[in-house]
Amino acid sequence: MLAAFGVPAFTWYWCGQLLSGVGTWSQSIALAWLVLDLTHSAVDLGTITMLQFLPVLALALFGGVIADRLPRRQLLVATQVALTAEALALGVLVATHAVTLWEVGLIALAVGTTNALNNPTQQAFVPELVGRDLVADAVALNSVQFNTARMVGGAVGGLAIGAWGISGALFLNAASFAPILLVLMKIRPARAAVRPTAGRATAISELRQGLSFALATTPIRRVVVLFAVVGLLGFNWQVAVPLVARFVLHRQAAGFGDLMAALGAGSLVAAVAVARDQRASEQRLIVGGVALGIALVALGLSRSYPLSLGILGIAGIAGVVTSITANTRLQLLTPNHLRGRVMGIYVLLMGGTTPVGSFLLGEVAGHLGTGAALVVFGAATAGGVGLIATLRRHASSRAGDAEAPEGSNGTTIGAC
């Protein structure tokens, strides 16, 4: 797993993203707590979360097209500058006590629009730094970085709110972008991606090409379908955890931060463990999705703070097993000139389905209560993944399962 750290540019990039990620998760804590302070409403929290992720749903695929057309390093510089400005703007509004819910929604929409370009570009940039042979190692290390940031950032965000208020956590996030901006200005990719010449194809035709490739390649299509269920129903932590903290466990910001840290701790353990086993099999994807659904059901039934911490740790493990497996399979099955577009699909499923899932979770929680909503969503996650796996087995059995055998890394030989 550590082989990718032999590439200095990747090492610097990884460290910069880690610091930036701590700030990002601190802002996530602050944003959720701000909405609950302003409105005390699960529905409003679901709505603001929907606004933050709605642009990812609408624009992530086009973000992948742009990531395939333009230099990715320069794109990342631009998105980090925009995210810094957005964090500063919200921080100033909160610090001056001028913030209203519509302004929070507007800035959440701006952050989501920036991330619709930023996230596919980040995913596609990593192979440029390390080369194809180290892609699996780099994906695993990126997951370690992401979940370390979630674990530390969740705790730091709760502490920052307690010490400096919500605006302090927002200003902390703005400052955290400085290291990654310096790194991006310094490093250069090990290999340049092949770019289409100007006028070679329209953005729409390139988008269609990427979608056609993903849907026509059977292993990729299976990842997309399975991960769509998990992304829609299982990855709604920005709504689920603050609702559990405030309305079920009756905790303050520090307790909320601890719950997010427990989720991140489980995720970090899983990231390190999965990184040591890079087969990225479809079976592992299915097991992770079902386990995540079961953990959500358990979280919905829990009324104990220590038990909820443990359940969130398990949920973090299941979620990361699912996301790393999906990410690695897609990276390894996709040629470089299509990687931005295919990873745009991954970003769409990872975060773009969140607007729908978060809004629905907020609505169900508003009518049935937080615990019942989590039970419903967890059961739907586990049941949906299990049903798809069962249907796939039956279809493969009828067809004689003529698919090529899987290689040692879990991807189908010759699928590219």
Image (tube, rainbow, N blue to C red):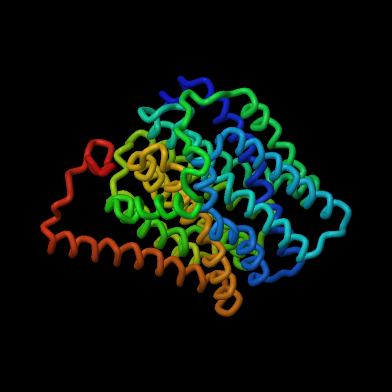
- Asked whether, in this view, residue 21 is left or right of residue 94, the answer is left
Residue at horizontal 28%, vertical 37%? 409
Indicate left or right for 141 with 386 as reference.
right
- Determine whether 116 is above or below 357 in the image: above
Q: Compared with residue 195, is residue 120 higher up or lower down, i.e. above or below?
A: below
- Looking at this view, name the residue that lies furthest to the left: 400
- Where, quadrant-wise, is the N terminus in this rendering? top left
Q: Nearer the viewer, residue 404 or 20?
A: 404
Q: Position of residue 252 (x, y in %)?
A: 70, 57
Q: Is residue 91 left or right of residue 155?
A: right
Q: Residue furthest bottom?
A: 367
Give x and y (percent) for residue 132. 38, 30
Residue 295 appears anywhere in the view: yes
| Rendered position, 232 above or below 21 | below
Among the 4 quarters of the image, the one containing residue 216: bottom left
Q: In the picture, residue 74 is in which quadrant?
A: top right
Percent x, y for residue 89? 79, 50
Quadrant showing the C terminus: top left
View extreme (front): residue? 199
Residue at screen point 65% across, 52% down? 28
Front residue of 247/24: it is 24
Q: Say whether residue 61 is left or right of residue 333.
A: right
The answer to whether one can see residue 313 in this image is: no
Q: How many marks?
A: 0
Residue at 47% x, 47% y: name it.
201
Where residue 359 appears, x then y in whole percent? 58, 69
